[in-house]
Amino acid sequence: MSSYSKLIIFIVVLVLISAALVFIESSTDSINKSMPEISDGIVQGDADYNEAVELVNNKNFYESMEKAESAGDNYNKSLSKLHEIQRNFSADVNKVHQEYITTTIRELELKLEAVDSLKEAIECFEVYSNYTGSNYGFEANDYMNQAVEYQHQRDSIVSDNPNLFKQNFIM
């Protein structure tokens, strides 16, 4: 084999190794860069959900439905980003970060179930089916309580591993 061929092979191997290192390094960086936006979606979703509940209690069903839909949109955006991160995990993503992402996904899935039940409750209250609406309301509350348990678990993961989470990673 000529020295020119060996040089070409060496350059190709070097480029492949460099590309692999960039990909591996970018996985954790991608998580850290995405977390503030994901966090904002969860916080805004929580605010919209709480406002929707308050509006239902005040019998303002139209606006409560709008807020419930907004909460669902915010939760769905954050959930989509988390699923994308999860699909792109590489070797540098440790078990703690994986557990954090998985816990946050489960939290959002439950919050979306709560939103769906709340929307069902609103629809029932609009047509004066108060008993059924109340049942959906209790169901929404149960889902949200389960989601809050996952939120506490997520917070514990961060507080137990402060060296693994940058300040902007915390939700």
Image (spheres, rainbow, N blue to C red):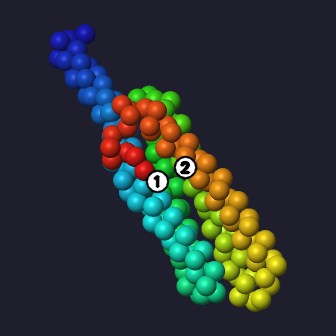
Crowdedness of circle 2 by 10 Å Cα count: few (<14), some, many (20+)?
some
Q: Amino acid at mark 1?
A: Lys
User: Which residue is denoted by mark 2 in the rendering?
Assistant: 151
As measured in the structure, the alpha-carbon distance from the residue carrying label 1 to the one carrying label 2 is 17 Å
Q: Position of residue 68 (x, y in %)?
A: 57, 74
Q: Is residue 135 visible?
A: yes
Q: Are marks 1 and 2 in contact (CB under 8 Å)?
A: no
Residue drawn 82% across and 79% down?
131
Residue drawn 40% across and 60% down?
40
Is 118 drawn above or below residue 101 in the view shown? below
User: Which residue is denoted by mark 1 in the rendering?
Assistant: 81
Quadrant, the N terminus: top left
Q: Quadrant of residue 39?
A: bottom left
Q: Secondary structure at mark 1?
A: helix
Is 24 drawn above or below residue 61 in the view shown? above
Q: Position of residue 30 (x, y in %)?
A: 36, 44
Residue drawn 68% across and 80% down?
122
Q: Amino acid at mark 2?
A: Gln
